[in-house]
Image: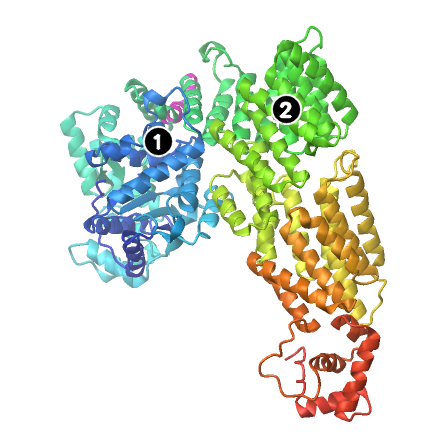
Amino acid sequence: MPQTVFTTPLIGRDEEVARLSGVLERARAGEARAVLLAGDAGVGKTRVLDELSGRAVRDGMTVLTGHCVDLGDVGLPYLPFTEVLGVLVGDERFADVLASHPVVDRLRGAATNAGHDVGGRLQLFEGMAALLAELAEIAPLLLVLEDLHWADQSSRDLLRFLLSRGILQRPAGGAPTHRLAVFASYRADDLHRRHPLRPLLAELVRLPAVERVELRPMADAEVTRLVRALQDRPLPDATVRGIVDRAEGNAFYAEELLAATDTEAGGVPSGLADVLLIRIEQLSDTAQQVLRTAAVAGRRVEHDLLRDAVGLPEDDLEAALREAIGRQLLVPGGNDTYAFRHALAREAVYADLLPGERARLHGTFARLLAGRGHPAESAAERAHHYRESHDLPDALAASLEAAGHAARVGAPAEELRHLETALDLWESVDPAARPSGDGVDRVTLTLRASAAAAHAGESHRAVSLTRAALASTGQDTDSELAARVRYTLAGNLMSVDSLTAAFAYSSEALAMIPAEPPSRTWVWAAATHVIAARHTGENETALRVARQALRVAEQLRVADAQADLLISLAILEGGGRRIPENQERLAEARELARQAGNAPVEMRALFNLAVGCFEAGNLEGCLPWVTEGLDRARRAGLLSSPYPLEMRYLHLLVLYTLGRWDECVRAAEADAAVLPAAGGYTMGPALYVALARGDLRAVERARALLEGPFDWMATLIAGLALTEAAVLRGEPEAAVERTRATVAALTDDSGRLPDVTVRFAALALTAVADAAVELRAAGGESDRWKDTADELVELARRTARHGEHGTPQGPEGMAWLARAEAEWLRAVSGPDAAAWERSMDAFGYGDVYEHLRSQVRFAEALLTAERRAEAAVQAREARAVAQRLGATPLLERIDDLVRRGRLADTPSEGERPSPLTAREQDVLRLLARGRSNRQIGEELFISGKTASVHVSNILAKLGAASRTEAVAIAYRQGLIAPEPTASG
């Protein structure tokens, strides 16, 4: 791609250029890297990127540059990437590569693909990654993306995918990555707290192949060099000092202030905009007219479009452009375009336009774009120009067209934005001037926007939009449409866990449509009502309505509704979805939904098939259903909808439970590249891995899940992670408080405790038991924690034995109950080997880590019972598993157990020869801490009587008359070392 030619010398960026050059060198050697280049407006990001691009070209690299553009609240999906593709299409060297990647036509909105979506968003992302990888095989590639602070959401999502999963990943077998580098710039001073780019940057900088380089303001000496280098005549020192002081290290400010010294303005203006406008005013009237017109077009404008908009003869236009370029206000670019030297220049010119002048020029550009026969991809630009020109009917039509284009290219966030713009314009447009056709009414468009919000992962926005649709219905609204709005609202409310309200609206929807004569609308209203009733504990109502509606669905041959109702009945009847009979029913529902072409219902069936396997303890059997469900969601473009998000979580949970932790973490990283903001909870199992490996940074990531509106799954995941963290930190009060708060938040309005309560109770009991054991060892009050332990074990018993649907939980729930019982005994009376053996066996259905944790407790209990040989076997087995998992905290506890229990029978290196046995050495150390015989026995897993025998032997061997004298002798002989004090 042709590079913009700057006459400004590059000064003061030696360190940054050297660092970026090193990245290019590594990329040419096959190590793909990315750099996020941050800096304030005007600090020199574009200049540095231009320098590096020039060096890359000279070193044989292909350089592709894409720019993000500020279109206000109108997004132009994938703009920088479509710009890159446009350049590639015009270069014959890449014709064969482009021909093998249909993603090019998809992104550019070619007419042949305008009518249908050919694969889903992830396929589009993977296609772009494959294209860049293949280009990098032809020649090393540098991809430059400028002004990310203006990037549309789809571009941000695609960049996230490319950097976290697509083009920087290392292939299997340790082969080199692609010969590719990505440099992406953004204005750091534009990133306010809620700027959408902030969370993406936070994710990307954590990737090992991504680094951040910040261009800080230049030093005064460097600005001085720059100012003098820009001017070919000597400048008075006072002038240079004034410019340096005012520029405050910003190269662009310095250039503009220097340029202003040639004017007759009588001094330097106080604001940069004033400086820019002073420069503009020195141009001829024609050149000023061209700049004002170009400012309305945006940062960059095509020559032909600018010529038609400004309405000047070609000679006059070229003279004006030459003048503006000579003054460094515009710079020529590739593909016969012109760009403002800096975005701030364009902004200043645009802001100085008169309101009428601005509206007139926007109207001109809108009409020109419409008349040039641009494909649907120009609809977003036309919508922007029409709106700013106050041509509301055409703005409405273009917004709807842009929404359609965004939907086709898999950009639900942009589709939502355009639909919301259309809805904002709707009442301002005369009814006769509004677009006509099926589904083009305010209520239907609002429902369509709510669907786009749901697909984009914005569940709360989907609820707000459906409420707006409800508010738009009136007495004259068709009853079926009114019912559809209500049951759609009920479904959206369930996705944000507002269950009581969902039940109320589904009840209204069902009441609005008579059951006779049978109708599809009544069936779907009933199907939604069944789900809402189940979620609010109205199981009898749910069963009655489901059975009735299933008969009607079969009568009407509404296969997808029949499938949906079969799923609900499989959950409600008998032993739930984990029993074989209901698994068969779910498989039947899946096939019905597939035949009907209803992807959401098919995914619901697949999700419940997977969960049923998990609840039955069949973890390996769960994975194929999850894989099939996610593949179906991918093909349907619904990966951000609720069931696929829950399947992503379930996928990671199964990998975590099976002990495939590295695979779990890798899958979580891959998912993160394409997840919507609302999908953060799906990363939960990766947080569990981090905590089990001792990485307490997971605590902050867990707390972040609690920010924003209430989300049931996010609250669950955060609660589990934060409770685990409290256990690791030895904070029983915090563990109990977190358990109580989370269970209360997860309990529905009917008072039903969620099944996961048993797990929370067991985890909190762990912290309580740890505290009780420590208290007993120190001779404290052993009953202090008894009431809390009793409360928690009763909570576990009640939940596991009755479950959400009144039946005992499956293998997982009963295993957690066994763990809770064992922890309760440890808290109130001490370790019980039989209880821990039961817990260990219960987790044998496939939960590797929980089996391991119970095994370690089993070994401790065996030592306490003086069954040392058995304890050694269990500890040895547990250590091997902990080491394989990388469960560092547990591994350290096992090693401590082996040392204290003398299970390895191997003396430590460097120990001073002693008349005492190894066990007597341990007893002596505890004597020095003032422990009683009983406390010594508890800590060393021996009886108090055995401890007393060891103490007597120590006294005899050291010739001491008392315990105190024995300790003093041991210190003098160096048998034990004084322990450091708290201040030491």
Identify the residue under disc 2: 489
Circle 2 residues within 10 Å: few <14, some 14–19, many ≥20? many
Q: Look at the image and give the residue range highlighted in magenta.
A: 381-393
- Display coloring: rainbow
Real-space CA distance between mark 1 and mark 2, rounded to the nearest whole angstrom? 35 Å
Count of numbered circles on the image? 2
Residue at horizontal 24%, vertical 60%? 225
Identify the residue under disc 1: 103
Q: Secondary structure at mark 1?
A: helix
Return the residue nearer the eye: 674 or 187.
Answer: 674
Residue 908 placement, left or right of 530: left
Q: Earlier in the sequence, mark 1 or mark 2?
A: 1
Which of discs 1 and 2 lies nearer the camera? The answer is 1
Residue 940 placement, left or right of 429: right
**Residue 694, x across and y down, in percent:** 59, 59
Return the residue nearer the eye: 379 or 98.
Answer: 98
**Residue 533, x across and y down, in percent:** 73, 26
Callout 1–callout 2 Cβ contact below 8 Å:
no
